[in-house]
Image (cartoon, rainbow, N blue to C red):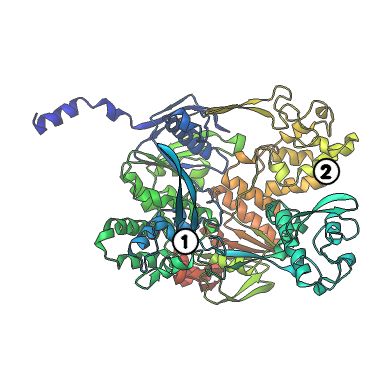
Amino acid sequence: MSSAKRADTRAAAPHPADGHDMIRVHGARENNLKDVSIEIPKRRLTVFTGVSGSGKSSLVFNTIAAESQRLINETYSAFVQGFMPTLARPEVDVLDGLTTAIIVDQQRMGADPRSTVGTATDANAMLRILFSRLGDPHIGPPSAYSFNTASVRASGAITVERGSKKAVKATYERTGGMCTHCEGRGKVSDIDLSQLYDDSKSLAEGAFTIPGWKSDSQWTVQVYAQSGFVDPDKPIREYTEKELRDFLYGEPVKVKVNGVNLTYEGLIPKIQKSFLSKDKEAMQPHIRAFVERAVTFTTCPECDGTRLSEGARSSRIGKVSIADACAMEIRDLADWVRTLDEPSVAPLLTALRDTLDSFVEIGLGYLSLDRPAGTLSGGEAQRVKMIRHLGSSLTDTTYVFDEPTIGLHPHDIQRMNDLLLRLRDKGNTVLVVEHKPEAIAIADHVVDLGPGAGTAGGTVCFEGTVEDLRSAGTVTGRHLDDRSSLKETVREPTGALEIRGANAHNLQDVDVDIPLGVLCVVTGVAGSGKSSLIHGSVPAGADVVAVDQSPIKGSRRSNPATYTGLLDPIRKAFAKANGVKPALFSANSEGACPTCNGAGVVYTDLAMMAGVASPCEDCEGKRFQPSVLEYRFGGRDISEVLAMSVAQAEEFFGTGEARTPAAHKILQRLTDVGLGYLTLGQPLTTLSGGERQRLKLATHMGEKGGVYVLDEPTTGLHLADVEQLLGLLDRLVDAGKSVIVIEHHQAVMAHADWIIDLGPGAGHDGGRIVFEGTPADLVADRSTLTGEHLAAYVGA
């Protein structure tokens, strides 16, 4: 058949396969979604907007992406599924036209000390192979350059079962690249003995300075005093070498103390087991303070922090070892790899170059491969995860992004937009949850959820183009073209925080005075040194309250009431009014329903199939014993109080017989940060990223501090919520506080009293102060990237 005839046939009768160009969602009810029905075009870039908590993540991640992953998992055998996370089918009537979903979310990378930027991507693996082929001297296979692989040597007899059994002598050897001193961590922990005891005193005189270790009656202290290994009446500094060794490093041994058999163990291993093996965040404040004083982490003296053995460090390509390569900024490493011309590893060099170029292209060229993964911000972690997808040959897949512009300077957002459009143009469906107008502007299709947050959201308010959104009258449409104007007058500082010679990470001996008593914004491109300057030079201490981007830790038993400490005054008020114990009014303590243990639901494990959670029949999901629900305060039982929204509870505890000032104060702070719609008993696991950030801010607002350091507080905030945040920052400053904000959002910059701009670039091109002054001066000056973007934003 000729090509002309083929074209005519295709035009006359479209192929049935070409008709599936929509992802159809009908009756979605996940979390707060209210029977949402929607059709999303395939092979287009669709942006989902709406205020924080309106249901964007519930629709995109918990419904569309979750069902795609569940269906893919079901294609594996039952045996393989047993090792995979079990996913329940989302609450939805119809999901049609799904393609394979690749999720690129904001989850921080694991903070394991062995995980680095290089190990989290494929870059380290390729470098190891490169050095094992070209390194001089040759020290072994790729594992010999891995700081996660220890060298192993073994020899002995093995039994060979071939015909008649016989023993054969065998040796086994594996060369690894791990530094034996720090075990591949790059740092070693050192215990400061002066924080454990006063060596001028004897044990009988109370030499121990460890919290909770009292000389007279404490069993632990008595074990040391009566062990027979040391003289309890001799000052520790007078111990013989053997006594000191037994005292500090003695092996576990049974001793008799006051007729009771107990275990004696050296002080150092005892401290390591009783304090250092526990999660520092879960400790009581005075114990945590002791651990921070007593334990110091220092760079490993043997490997100088490179994590690698001497052999791995000695092998070089030219003059560069693998440790040198990993310590370079990635853009410099990419230039070095380009200088290598070795036909035997040409395909490997091409793949490595492409990976490193992807880092540079995505705006992460300032990182190094040995940077610990746990130190990356949420935005950096998300972009590192994108690296592996940029060169992918897959098409017709669905890429799902959760606010990819987080942590990006306006200058970097254009680069991110280009990457998203490139993924779309390869024939993929790109779904993006986003708040930034610059990112919404590139959408082919916009879905706006709302109208409000929580129970006031969960419906589709608008579908269409960006132009139509502007005139749609929705919250997003009204605020899309909002532009904050520069302040006419700025506050005068009441003092200054002097920073001299700051050189953490890429800072280049920075001297700067941060004004106090005003709203000071620290800005600059991603990687310019903002966090290094502020977090490194303004330590969170007695007068400093730091609210960073670290995620809230909480299980499904945690809720806003428990996290903020609100439940304590409520429990006490209930207990006092009814003459019973406060513990009865906790679903995690004595008052819990015995059937569901206070969870409100009963989980049934169905092995490889998704587990089922059904409301507890005994407490009907209220989480408390029936007898506890008979106690009332202000006419309500405890389950009814936990079912209230923050706004309702604020009114309830503010006046009348239920008036509780301690609870009311916390509820006011939650309302101030725009969380009035949350219910007190809502599990933390159901909160969006923006809601968690504001919950954290509300909690820290209760701390007594004169200086507030906020790290990108606009993260996850809708345009309409940013206005409310600015009002909150103003109230803090007007109350006599000093507020330092690390921020990229132009609305916050325009609202500042003082701006400190770092740059001019990222990594070794940054780390300098390029501007200090008022926002109006920055706009008039236009000498920096921030100045140019702020001028364009305010229309100057």
Q: Amino acid at mark 1?
A: Gly
Res. 309 visible in picture: yes
Determine crowd level at label 2: few under 14, some 14-19, many 20+ residues with C-alpha closer than 10 A.
some
Query: Which of the labelled discs sits on residue 128, or is there none?
Result: none
Residue 740: x and y, percent?
Answer: 62, 64
Quarter of the figure with residue 212: bottom right
Residue at mark 1? 177
Circle nearer the N terminus (1, 2): 1
Residue at image position (78%, 45%) is 664
Residue at image position (71%, 68%) is 192
Name the side, left or right, on which 721 lies relative to 306: right
Determine crowd level at label 1: few under 14, some 14-19, many 20+ residues with C-alpha closer than 10 A.
many
Residue 377: x and y, percent?
Answer: 53, 56
Q: Amino acid at mark 2?
A: Thr
Of badges 1 and 2, the one in the foreground is 1
Specify the farthest residue to the left. 2
Query: Which of the labelled discs sits on residue 660, or is there none?
Result: 2
Quarter of the figure with residue 132: bottom left
